[in-house]
Image (cartoon, grey):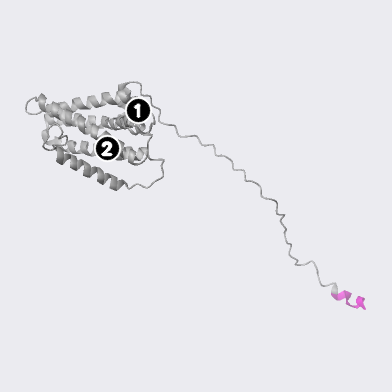
């Protein structure tokens, strides 16, 4: 009886549309081997401060390299010479009036010296408040004076303009003031670049401006302290 349906069953293809299911053998997880990308490191700024001339060169082009150097305090002698150079320029600015007045020059140089020391102490206190004990006052002194190379160049131009075109003297006084005002913030960012904490730079700048205004108010009647008397 079964042979009766063989001719019909022959038309049925049992293996016609069967879906082939692909079975994946789940192998245990293997640690992925990451191929290291061989990237040539960026060539660092190669500098060697071996003389006062090289110190002036690098502090004028890139003063931040001194601030980024943890051991920048070893350039204390060069920074001291840089401050003396700055004070000599400030002396001639104060003395260059209608006629050479050396007493006014000395007063202006002393006021510049005292203000610089006040700026060093204030910047150092910012670091102490920020719990950064590895920053010494010697390093702060060197780092601040490294930015004074630019200020010395601006004051030299200011001295030339004071002798030739006194009307153009005031803009350079404002520029020097702004450069000096920006030094504590520049150093603060440089010292704490790798530290993770939130600091409102705007408030810190505002505090610095308030302290500078207070300095101007308290010293305006004291000639040997009135460093920004023409601002």
The single residue placed furthest to the left in the displayed view is 98
The single residue placed furthest to the top in the displayed view is 51
Q: Quadrant of residue 116?
A: top left
Dot 1 surroundings within 10 Å: few (below 14), some, or many (20 or more)?
A: many
Residue 38 horizontal/vertical position (percent): 54, 36
Residue 169 horizontal/vertical position (percent): 14, 35
Please say if 36 is above or below 66.
below
Secondary structure under tag 1 reads helix
* Residue shown at 34% from the left, 46% from the top: 199
Residue highlighted by disc 2: 122
Query: In which quadrant is the N terminus drawn?
Result: bottom right
* Part of the protein shown in magenta: 1-8
Between label 2 and label 1, give the one nearer the viewer.
2
Q: Quadrant of residue 87?
A: top left
Is 190 contained in the magenta span? no
Circle nearer the N terminus (2, 1): 1
Q: Which mark is residue 73?
A: 1
Query: In which quadrant is the C terminus drawn?
Result: top left
């Amino acid at each position: 009886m079964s042979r009766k349906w063989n001719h019909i069953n022959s038309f049925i293809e049992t293996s016609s549309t069967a879906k082939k299911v692909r079975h994946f053998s789940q192998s245990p997880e293997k640690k992925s081997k990451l191929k290291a990308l061989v990237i040539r490191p960026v060539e660092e700024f190669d500098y060697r401060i071996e003389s006062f001339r090289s110190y002036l060169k690098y502090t004028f082009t890139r003063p931040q390299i001194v601030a980024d150097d943890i051991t920048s305090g070893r350039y204390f002698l060069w920074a001291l010479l840089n401050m003396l150079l700055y004070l000599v320029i400030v002396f001639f600015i104060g003395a260059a009036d209608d006629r050479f007045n050396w007493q006014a020059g000395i007063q202006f140089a002393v006021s510049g010296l005292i203000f610089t020391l006040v700026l060093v102490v204030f910047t150092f206190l910012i670091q102490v408040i920020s719990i950064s004990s590895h920053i010494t006052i010697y390093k702060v002194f060197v780092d601040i004076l490294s930015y004074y190379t630019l200020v010395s160049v601006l004051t030299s131009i200011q001295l030339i303009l004071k002798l030739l075109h006194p009307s153009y003297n005031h803009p350079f006084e404002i520029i020097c003031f702004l450069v000096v005002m920006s030094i504590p913030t520049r150093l603060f960012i440089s010292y704490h670049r790798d530290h993770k904490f939130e600091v409102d730079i705007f408030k810190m700048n505002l505090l610095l401006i308030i302290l500078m205004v207070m300095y101007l108010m308290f010293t305006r009647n004291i000639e040997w302290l009135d460093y920004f008397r023409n601002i």
